[in-house]
Image (spheres, grey):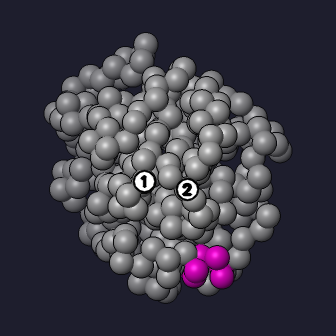
Amino acid sequence: MTLSMSDILAARKTISGKVIRAPLLPSRYFSERAGAPFFMKMETMQPTGAFKLRGATNAALNAPEGTTKLTCCSTGNHGRAVAHAAHTLGLQATICMSSLVPKAKVDGIIALGAQAHIKGRSQDEALAECRRLSQSEGVYEIPPFDHPLVIAGQGTIGLEMLEDQPDMAAILVPLSGGGLAAGVALAAKSINPKIKVIGITMERGAAMFASVQAGRPVEVEEVASLADSLGGGIGLDNQLTFTMCRDLLDDIILVSEDEIYHAQQALYYEEAQVAEGASVVGIAALLAGKLPIINGPIGTIITGRNLDMGDFTRIIAGEDITLGNDHLKGRPYAP
């Protein structure tokens, strides 16, 4: 299987009017820190609170004839997107998740009328349950990232960013299974082959980073993270996103939990925006001084806002946070 810009253009036509064209907002504060114009693609404004609605909607609207139920494996946001798409189309939905998915995200999926199946403590275990369900007649599985229609849907973000800011020199993309990064990189580099597309992910349990380093898809231990949406494996039988991320990303940068914590604070205090830990990894890399020299405007994608507001308010207040069996020391925000 291969994807091209034509797939992304087709996806845009399919999802037009069904997802929001999120604004690309300039940030004075982050521009000063970057020493270059800095823009944020606000995918938090999607009806489901995250960019995943694009890929899920594109796949759902291309479901085979006779489909009566949608299913997927998710760390939360993709599941909400599939549940929303199913509700819109009058279909049933069953979302398979591991016990590491925060309760707030599970509750959001159930609120959309979908069934939530909690299976095991890893995305691989949840995926096995999803694959089992997908064998039933009339059930259509929409994978969270390694699927051409999903990748094409996410790629519409890169297309819009370059339309709104044609001289963009670099895009910082939150990196997990690679659907977003692969789609955005394909779109951006099809328009401007010289643009830098940099994947940003957390230090703990970064499956795509470990796989690119190894030269093949590998398994990683999943651990609790402020960037929980970036958790999970990429699948040992990965068909698309591993190769695309390996070939299209110019670099992959890792950020620590402390750096993510500080970036969530910065986005809130400087731009009055509420966002998940996974959304701010590009900002975390900027504030930590981990970005390479970039000559021109920089963009990042604020991917989602579906989080535990109790934890978020503790972060904003500078309080300590518990991540699984680990304890993250808090600190008051300081620019």
Q: Residue furthest toward the top?
A: 325
Give the spatial CA distance, label 2 vs label 1: 8 Å
Q: Amino acid at mark 1?
A: Leu
Q: What's drawn in magenta, residue-wise?
A: 5-10
Q: On the rendered structure, is 249 left or right of 40?
A: right
Circle 1 packing at 10 Å, graded few (<14), some (14-19), many (20+), is: some
Q: Residue at x 46, y 29 (%)?
A: 117
Q: Give the label on residue 28, or none.
A: none
Q: Residue at x 50, y 77 (%)?
A: 14
> Residue at position x 61%, y 62% from top?
64
SS under mark 1 = loop
Asked whether the residues under the numbered discs 2 and 1 touch, taking CB atoms below 8 Å apart as contact, a structural biologist would say: yes
Residue 271 in view: yes
Disc with the residue nearer the chain's start (2 vs 1): 2
**Could you tell me which secondary element the residue under label 2 belongs to?**
loop
Task: Pick the quarter of the image with the N terminus.
Answer: bottom right
In the image, residue 253 sits, relative to residue 271, either above or below, namely above
Circle 2 residue: 67
Q: Find out whether residue 204 is within the magenta segment.
A: no
The residue at the point 35 percent across, 34 percent down is: 106
- Magenta segment main secondary structure: helix
What residue is disc 1 on? 91
Q: Is residue 308 above or below residue 276?
A: above
Q: Position of residue 52 (x, y in %)?
A: 45, 56
Q: Amino acid at mark 2?
A: Thr
The residue closer to the viewer here, 16 or 115, is 115
Crowding at mark 2 (Cα within 10 Å: few <14, some 14-19, many 20+): some
Residue 30 x/y as whole percent: 33, 62
Whole-percent x and y of residue 196? 61, 69
Name the one closer to the observer, 287 or 124.
124
Let me know if residue 9 is in the magenta part: yes
